[in-house]
Amino acid sequence: MAQTNSSNTPANIANEERVVPQLIVGLGNPGQKYDRTRHNVGFDLVDRLARLWAISLAEQRKFQGIVGEGFAFPGRKVRLLKPLTYMNRSGQSIRAVVDFYKLPPTSVLVVYDDMDLPVGRLRMRLSGSAGGHNGMKSAIAHLGTQNFPRLRIGIGAPKPVSPEQKDTVSHVLGRFSPNEQTLLAEIMRLSEGAIELSLKDGVSKAMSLYNNQSASSATS
């Protein structure tokens, strides 16, 4: 079984010398109708990493997901995962991979969309709550801890349909505007850089360098 010591605190992780990902998980929903939607930016980044590192991705039923394994650079093996369980059950797939390869939760980097960040911004953290994201709720529940690194990619807040209500579902399942796509392409490149640095020098180093960066026209 994978190590899921929930007694670890964020401070414990922050004090570790280096947290280096071994498994990079992109959250999203399977199926053509969800392609390129805001909710699927995690899937999209994993696809980019697979191309960047020449890693082949293939569905593996035992993992309930699309999986690949290879080297990000010489000496640094990495695994990629796109759960096919649909967003709300992403943790099932993550746990299956973690158990099979006997990975500690701290080696799992989860990439997902965040409405609290504008398009063109990213945030990397060593630990934290789900922040209302159902895919992250599932990941935390199945890993038995919230102390694992994550990369949040901004998708912007939904527009209000009334003073009291926002259409969150239509927003996250919608697609980016042409202007937003330009910002997204730039933040995806920055996200690639943040992940590569985390593989070389640890997540804390990547956080310090990339958390204050943004796509050139993004608003804070």
Image: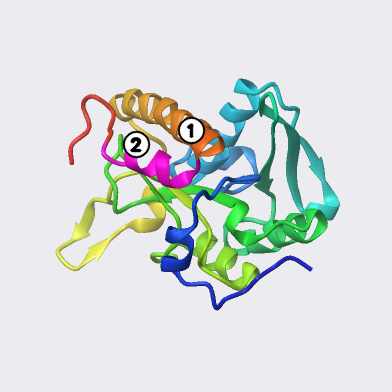
Q: Is residue 136 left or right of residue 166?
A: right
- Residue displayed at 38% across by 51% down: 114
- Mark 2: which amino acid? Tyr
Q: Reply yes or no: does residue 80 show up in magenta.
A: no
- Residue displayed at 33% across by 42% down: 208
Q: Is residue 173 visible?
A: no
Q: Which residue is mark 2?
A: 210
**Mark 2 or mark 1, earlier in chain:** 1
Quick one: 153 or 84, which is closer to the camera?
A: 153
Q: Is residue 187 visible?
A: yes
Describe the element under mark 2 as helix, strand or loop: helix
- Residue displayed at 85% across by 54% down: 62
Q: Which residue is mark 1?
A: 197
- Mark 1: which amino acid? Leu
User: Can you say which quadrant of the picture contains the N terminus?
Assistant: bottom right
Q: Please say if the residues under marks 2 and 1 sit with CB atoms less than 8 Å apart.
A: yes
Q: Is residue 210 left or right of residue 66?
A: left
Coloring applied to the structure: rainbow
Range of residues picked out in magenta: 202-212
